[in-house]
Structures are given as C-alpha cells and as structure tokens.
Amino acid sequence: MPADPKLSARLRGLPQVQRLLETDEAERLCARFSRAAVVEALRATLEEARAALRVAGPTPDATVLLQAAGLRLAAGRRPDLRRVINATGVVLHTNLGRAPLAAAALAAMAEAGAGYCNLELDLAAGGRGARGGALEPLLCAVTGAEAGLAVNNAAGAVLLALSALAAGGEVIVSRGELVEIGGGFRIPDVIAQGGATLVEVGTTNKTRLDDYRRAVTERTRVLLKVHQSNYRIVGFTAEATLEQLAGLAREHGLAVMHDLGGGALVDLARLGRAAEPRPQDSLAAGADLVAFSGDKLMGGPQAGLLVGRRALVDPLRRHPLVRALRPDKTTLAGVEATLQLYRDPDRAALEIPTLRMLAQTAAQVAQRAMRLHAAVAPELAAEITPSIAQVGGGSLPGEALQSWSVTLDSAGRDPGALAARLRAGAPAVVGRITAGRLALDLFTVADEEVELLAGRLNAAARA
C-alpha cells in the first residue's frame, strides 16, 4: 500500500531529539532531571506524537513536545504514595491509610526520623535499653494494665500472643466470633499459624458459658474472645461475657485473651456515637491480655498494642516473633505522642482527627458542603444532598453518621472520567459514584481542605 504523502510530511515535521535538546527549555529540564532522563522522555514523547499523527491531527511544535516531556518527567518523580482528600465519607478508610494523625504525632515522628534517637539506648544509664520502653508506662497509665507491648500491627499482636501462649495447645473460640476482616485475615488461620489447635464452641448466634466449660481439656491454653468488629449478629442471640470467661479460666488455670480490634480509648458515647468496648473495660472485666489497633479508633499510626498481666506480657517480649514484628522508630514516636494525648481525654477529643471527626454534627458538615457548593464552577451542576457516612476500619458497622454531600453532574459527561481526573491530580481526590453522579461526602473533608478541593474540582472540570 503506497505511503500517504500528507502523513509523511507531518512525520517529517517532527523535530529531532538533538534539536530539542538545544533549546533553553531542554537545558532547564536537564538541570532539573539530568540529560539522560530528558533524552529518554523526549524519545518517548516523540514516539507518542508519531502514533498520534498516524491517526489524525497537526504536527506538534517543539514547545508542545517539550511541555509534554516535562510533564512526563515530573510524573516520574512524583511519589506513588501521596496525599489524598478523602471525600468518601468513610472515616477509617483502609485503602486511604485509615486514621489521619494528630499534629503532635506528626511532629514526634518527624523529629525521630530527622536524625538519630535513643531507640534502644537508656540515656540515663548510658547502656542498651528496651525498644519501645517509653510506651509501656503510657499504655499502663491509659488502660490500667500491669504491662504493655507494641508490635507493628494488630494481626501481628494476636499472632504473637497465641504463638507464645498457646503453641502446641488448644484455643477455644465461639463460632460467632470466627471473623474474617480486611485482606483475608481470618482468626482460624492465625490460630493455626500460631501453632495452636482451634476448638469451636456454640453456634453462630448463641454461645453460652457451658459451651466453653465442656470444651476445656488438659490441652486448653487460652479462652479467646474476639470483637466482631465489622459485622453484628442481632435477634435471637446469647454470648458468654468476659467476666464469665475469666471465672472459668481461673478455675482451670487458663488465660483469657480479648482481640478487641478497633482500639477505642475513650467512651465514644461522649462523642455522640454508639458505645464501643475499650481495652480498660476488657481488663476490668477480667481479661488477662487485650490486643487492639493503634491506627483505627485510637487514631495513631499503624501498630498492634498488647496490654494485660505482666506474667503474660513478659513471655511475649522474649518470643522470636517479636523481632519480626517490631515497629520502627517513627511509628513508636507517633504511638507515644498519640497516647500522651489520651492522658487528658478532653484534649484527645480535640486534637486527634478521628475523634474530632466522629464528634462533629450534621450541621457542621452542612456548613462545609455549602462552602464547597458556592466555590465550584457552574458547569459542574453541583447539588447538596443528604448522605450517610461510615466509621469504617471494621469499627461500629451499624453506626450511621448523618452527613451531607456535594454531587456533581460534570455537564452530563461520564462521572467516571471526572473521578479519574480527580484521582490523577495533586492532591488526589477520592469520592463515590452514585446514581450517575460523582458524590463528595464532606464528613471526611477537613475545614482547611474545602478551598483546595474546590480548586481541584474546577481544574478537573476545565480539563
């Protein structure tokens, strides 16, 4: 098939790489990114231009090509893990990093990471110290425990405890508590990985103390109670209480462990939300060991926290898994700073973003929605609509948070295309598509993010 003379002419009109490199703009790009990187970007940009010209369109000039290469280079430098404005209405969104951190935690993490720190050095004695040693007194002060320990996540905390306390023995769990949470984390799998044998008792909806009592053998090591976290069984139900399990455990010399999940350290009823069991409540009810998350309702960095009787916590420190599960210096600094805020629960409610978000009213959310609505471009056909936000993170699954959203029509265009443009920008914006419109729930958008969000919306609408 003969070549298209017009296409050949358009292709010949593309400048060579060397000619582009001789421009002032190319020199600026070389100073910023290196000559080798600029050459590679220009070659890739020219190849894309050739492919486009074979379809249709005019030949791009040097300015357009250099701008495209600059954007390519900048995108390559942009970190994959970057800031997102959460407009989903899910407070503890696992895909978006769960809890935003308090200013005090961020400052502590920055200070610990900026240079050296006394991670495993006792500054007073001048000798080796315990990693995370400062956390234990804080954990004890906040929860009332005898001892405490931090690892890198809550699943690791449960695995460590069962490996140290129940390997080679049996762990008794109610069938109604054999949960699976995000990422395929299943309680039966963790028990098996810890080297113990799972003994299921009761039924899905009813498990009584006698079910546990009949299952106790000479191989039993732990009575494990698991907070259901991300679901609820309602109606014709019954369960053995921690107090009852503690009494049974004392009769047989066993340990009672409570896998609490979410890690609420304050009474959420004070914030106008449903009650959620706290580690201090579990310990007061007789649990010997409690495991919970640092990055959910506690509002700190990702961590798994264990509190309880010293006779059970101390063996965990000596277990080989501890080294594999230990948190780094910045995590420890952030957890410590977050726990410090809980020394004063009123201060924690004001300074920890998760608690502050949960305490807000629908009227406060509506004010932000009105600010955003007033700032977005008319062509987006924005409307303010009522919505329901969620706590997320496997916490308070039945709790409906009354909220308000700004929904966008994008001049009748595909809402998925607008959502994609918002995700691609800086900062990225993540919302929900519902009823053919992009919905931005203001429950999880901070006051200081409203104008920034409006700017991103308007820029995306013009694209």
Image: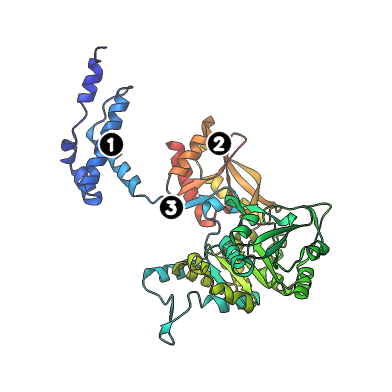
| 191 horizontally vs 335: left or right | right
The amino acid type, in three-letter code, at marker 1 is Ala
Specify the farthest residue to the top. Answer: 1
Residue occupied by mark 3? 81
Of the residues shown, which amino acid type is indicated by label 2? Ala
Disc 2 secondary structure class: loop
Please tell me which residue lies in front, 126 or 82. Answer: 126
Instruction: Tell me the residue that label 1 is attached to.
Output: 44
Quadrant for the C terminus in the image: top left
Q: Position of residue 336 (x, y in %)?
A: 52, 72
421 sits left or right of 193 in the view: left
Q: Depth check: 364 or 58 in front?
A: 58
Question: Horizontal and vertical percent for residue 414?
Answer: 52, 32
Q: Is residue 443 visible?
A: no
Residue 116 locus on image (x, y percent): 37, 73
Q: CA distance from mark 2 to mark 1?
A: 38 Å
Residue 290 locus on image (x, y percent): 65, 69
| Picture layout, residue 190 above or below residue 305 | above
Q: Nearer the viewer, mark 2 or mark 1?
A: 1
Three-letter amino acid code at disc 3? Leu
- Residue displayed at 33% across by 22% down: 55
The residue where tag 2 is placed is: 381
Left or right: where 230 falls relative to 111: right
Tell me the CA gap for discs 1 and 3: 25 Å
Query: Where, by quadrant of the figure, is residue 354 drawn?
Result: bottom right
Residue 224, numbered circle:
none
Badge 1 element = helix
